[in-house]
Image: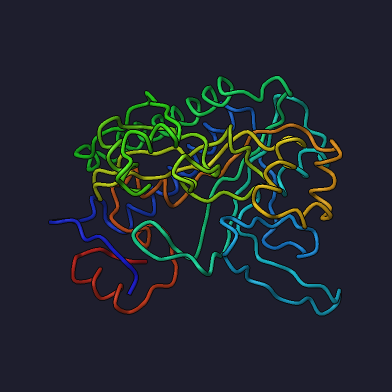
């Protein structure tokens, strides 16, 4: 059985029919607001990629990709896990200029995900990427972008509360963001696990951007895993909200300024992944052939779940769950789709 939290006295605030209507409103409004705020244009995304390109993301490095052979080409393909590297190639190939970017509806299968209230093997998110100048590769530009995304979330939330009065009992999230690095967080709570640190800090401070994820801390371990070949570990982070329904810190987005040729080389070596230098994407980036970019992923089901006050991600997306989880949710009045 996957690990689940059953909130005391929980009941959905909307019927299943109204939930579906609300999901449509959230996805349309947030995508439009995000695109206007960050100057993004929608593009089509691949569902799978050729394995030999190295464009599929490795996430924490241990997740198995869903792989299959293609009869007519004789090649191996992989269902995407995310599109961080593909988007950067697309910006170059599509001719995007500085200050402009793309977003797409990304659908992925993560077969090794540990299932719980927030995690499903099916991942749906807005993957976005934007061309920036080399001089924009700094913390101030990163923070400015984070504030814009959080403002889009809060505007969508306020609009939905206006359309569905049943949601009024849910607290609105603050657009004010507290910024903290993973090392500062470890220093505050040295005896806690990384997740416990997030819970303690976000419960007290509200909307948070936790920065510099992937690099080793003074304890000798990183706060969390990050692939070495898309985010710059000094210029990335997670957008965290407080989820009042579940009583936990809630990651909505992983994002960051992407690696430069210099930081890619350094991180590949640090992560023991120097063998990737020969892959097409990595060769192009190390040669300075790709634009400087910032980007990330924003969970679609995660956003719907947060705004609707849902207790389980299965209330806002269709996926596969073990029978014990289905039975526990049914007993608790949590309607899985």
Residue 23 lies left or right of residue 294; in this view the side is left
Question: Quarter-wise, where is residue 191 in the image?
Answer: top left
x, y percent for residue 330: 23, 71
The residue nearer to you, when weighing 197 against 160, is 197
Q: Residue at x 42, y 29 (%)?
A: 180
User: In this orientation, does residue 327 appear?
Assistant: yes
Q: Position of residue 149 (x, y in %)?
A: 49, 31
Quick check: can you spot residue 299?
Answer: no
On the image, which quarter does residue 50 sit in? bottom right
Left-right relation of 120 to 263:
left
> Is 267 situated above or below 16?
above
Image coords of residue 116 (percent x, y): 35, 63
- Whether 287 is drawn above or below 336: the answer is above
Q: In the image, what residue occupies the spot 75% across and 35% down? A: 262
Please name the residue shown 82% across and 41% down the image: 286
96 relative to 249 in the view: left or right: right
Nearest the viewer among 67 and 302 is 67
Could you say which quadrant of the image residue 311 lies in?
Answer: bottom left
């Amino acid at each position: 059985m996957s690990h689940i939290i059953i909130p005391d006295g929980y009941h959905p605030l909307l019927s299943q029919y109204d939930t579906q209507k609300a999901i449509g409103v959230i996805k349309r409004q947030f995508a439009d607001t995000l695109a206007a705020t960050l100057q993004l244009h929608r593009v089509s995304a691949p569902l799978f990629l050729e394995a030999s390109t190295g464009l599929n993301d490795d996430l924490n490095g241990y997740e198995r990709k869903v792989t299959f052979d293609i009869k007519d080409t004789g090649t191996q393909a992989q269902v995407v896990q995310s599109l961080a590297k593909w988007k950067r190639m697309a910006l170059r190939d599509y001719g995007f200029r500085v200050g402009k970017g793309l977003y797409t509806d990304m659908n992925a299968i993560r077969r090794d995900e540990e299932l719980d209230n927030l995690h499903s093997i099916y991942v749906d998110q807005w993957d976005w990427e934007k061309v920036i100048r080399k001089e924009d590769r700094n913390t101030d530009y990163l923070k400015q972008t984070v504030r814009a995304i959080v403002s889009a979330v809060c505007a969508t939330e306020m609009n939905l509360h206006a359309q569905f009065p049943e949601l009024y009992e849910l607290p609105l999230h603050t657009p004010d963001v507290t910024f903290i690095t993973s090392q500062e967080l470890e220093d505050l709570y040295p005896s806690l696990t990384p997740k416990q640190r997030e819970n303690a800090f976000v419960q007290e401070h509200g909307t948070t951007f936790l920065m510099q994820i992937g690099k080793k801390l003074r304890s000798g371990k990183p706060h969390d895993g990050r692939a070495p070949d898309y985010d710059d570990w000094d210029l990335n982070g997670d957008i965290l909200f407080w989820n009042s329904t579940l009583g936990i810190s809630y990651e909505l987005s992983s994002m960051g300024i992407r690696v430069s040729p210099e930081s890619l080389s350094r991180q590949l070596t640090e992560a023991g992944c120097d063998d990737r230098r020969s892959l097409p994407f990595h060769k192009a980036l190390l040669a300075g052939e790709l634009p400087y970019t910032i980007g990330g992923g924003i969970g679609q089901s995660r956003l719907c779940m947060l705004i609707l006050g849902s207790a389980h991600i299965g209330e806002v997306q269709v996926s596969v769950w073990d029978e014990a989880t289905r039975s526990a949710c049914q007993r608790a009045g949590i309607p899985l789709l």
